[in-house]
């Protein structure tokens, strides 16, 4: 068990300080969802974002550093080869509906906090109960599994498609093709 909130990660036997504020990690997660970025660019973005002194990490330790980033982002949990599932949430799109319940759980306005550790914010996120965001994710999950929505869910979906459907992110090349097809 880990009883302290980490502000450094050990890579190759050396402790490196990290940026641990929740806003930094959320911005990184949005960046990692950018379709234009290749995996190498995403890896570099993670290293640069999380480790302020990433340039002092030997390149031979980059994979270990990335593994530590994933461990940190996952709240101290190691990934165990989870099966691929359809995306049920989008940090950028859903943030306005996530922050209210998180504030309720924390008992203060998280956006006003000068600093809030990612794990504290993530713990609050995991405690989100029945709320608008939970309804949205429930409907997305049912649709992803091909389950039928009940009447109230169907009505809710009809009235709230704009916040329920995850907006597809297009690369610049895809956007140009779409604009040409639409005659714009």
Image (cartoon, helix red, strand yellow):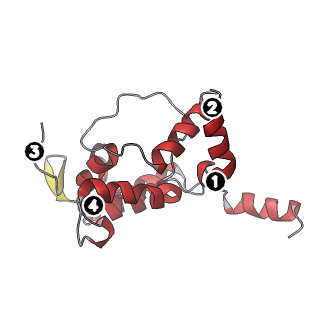
**Which residue occupies 28% across, 50% down?**
124
Q: Nearer the viewer, mark 3 or mark 4?
A: 3
Say which label, 1 or 2, has the lower sequence index.
Answer: 2
The mark found on residue 51 in the picture is 4
Q: Are marks 1 and 2 in contact (CB under 8 Å)?
A: no
Is residue 30 in view from this perspective?
A: no
Judged from the image, the secondary structure of the residue bearing numbered disc 3 is loop
Q: Residue at x 27, y 66 (%)?
A: 52
- The label on residue 150 is 2
Kindly report the distance in space between the C-alpha atoms of the residues bearing marks 1 and 3: 38 Å
- The alpha-carbon separation of the residues under discs 1 and 2 comes to 23 Å
Estimate how packed mark 2 is, as few (under 14), some (14 to 19) or many (20 or more) residues with alpha carbons within 10 Å: few
Judging depth in this view, the residue of 22 and 177 nearest the camera is 22
First-in-chain label (2 vs 3) = 3
Question: Alpha-carbon neighbours of circle 3 within 10 Å: few (<14), some, or many (≥20)?
Answer: few
Q: Residue furthest left?
A: 3
Q: Point out the frontmost of discs 1 and 2.
A: 2
Q: Is residue 135 above or below residue 42?
A: above
Real-space Cα separation, disc 4 to disc 1, in angstroms? 30 Å
Residue 99 % position (x, y): 39, 59
Identify the mark nearer the N-term, 4 or 2. 4
Q: Residues within 10 Å of mark 4 (few under 14, many from 20)?
A: many
Could you tell me residue 58's position as x and y percent? Answer: 26, 54
């Amino acid at each position: 068990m880990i009883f302290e909130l980490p502000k450094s990660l050990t890579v190759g036997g050396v402790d490196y300080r990290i940026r641990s504020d929740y806003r930094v990690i959320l911005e990184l997660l949005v960046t990692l969802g950018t379709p234009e970025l290749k995996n190498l660019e995403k890896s570099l973005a993670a290293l640069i974002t999380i480790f302020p002194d990433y340039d002092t990490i030997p390149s031979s330790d980059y994979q270990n550093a990335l593994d530590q980033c994933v461990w940190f982002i996952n709240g101290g949990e190691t990934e165990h080869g989870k099966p691929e599932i359809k995306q049920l949430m989008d940090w950028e799109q859903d943030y306005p509906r996530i922050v209210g319940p998180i504030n309720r759980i924390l008992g203060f306005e998280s956006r006003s906090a000068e600093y809030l550790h990612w794990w504290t914010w993530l713990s609050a996120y995991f405690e989100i109960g029945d709320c608008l965001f939970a309804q949205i994710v429930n409907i997305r999950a049912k649709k992803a599994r091909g389950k039928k929505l009940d009447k109230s869910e169907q009505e809710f979906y009809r009235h709230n498609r704009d916040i329920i459907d995850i907006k597809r992110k297009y690369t610049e090349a895809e956007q140009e093709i779409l604009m040409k097809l639409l005659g714009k």
